[in-house]
Amino acid sequence: MFGLFKSDPAKKLLKQYKAKLEKAMHAQRNGDIRSYSFLTEEAEALKEQLDALNASSTPQ
């Protein structure tokens, strides 16, 4: 019953991942390739965490 109010860590990571990708896209469009590469790297790290979380929560 109280599980309804618990936040889903996968949703939070997915939201952060999408936000990083959007920031990276804007940096690339503005010509700031260095920031684009840093933001993309951070987004990929979040994606790895998200994949690991999904793999551990999926029953086999």
Image (cartoon, rainbow, N blue to C red):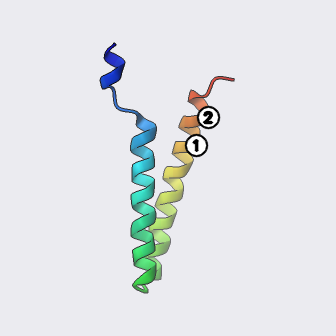
Asked if the residues shown at circle 1 and circle 2 are in contact, with their CB atoms under 8 angstroms apart, the answer is: yes
What secondary structure is found at the residue carrying circle 2? helix
Residue 53 appears left or right of 15: right
4, 21: nearer the viewer: 4
Q: How many marks?
A: 2
Residue plotted at (46% across, 39% down): 10
Three-letter residue code for mark 2: Ala
Residue 56's x, y, as percent? 59, 30
Question: x, y percentage for residue 28?
Answer: 46, 79
Around disc 2, counting alpha carbons within 10 Å, would you say few (fewer than 14), some (14 to 19), or many (20 or more)?
few
* For residue 47, above or below residue 37: above
Q: Which residue is mark 2?
A: 55
Q: Is residue 32 visible?
A: no
Most extreme residue toward the bottom is: 31
Q: Is residue 1 above or below residue 25?
A: above
Residue in view at x 46 percent, y 64 percent: 21
Question: Residue tagged by mark 1?
Answer: 51
- Look at 58% across and 39% down and name the residue there: 52
Q: Secondary structure at mark 1?
A: helix
Give 38 or 60, whichever is nearer the viewer. Answer: 60
Q: Quadrant of the N terminus?
A: top left
Q: CA distance from mark 1 to mark 2?
A: 6 Å
Expressed as whole percent of the image width and height from the top left, the position of residue 41 reads 51, 63
In the rendered image, the vertical position of residue 60 relative to residue 35, given as above or below: above
Q: Amino acid at mark 1?
A: Asp
Residue 25 pos. (x, y %): 45, 73
Indicate the quadrant where residue 26 lies.
bottom left
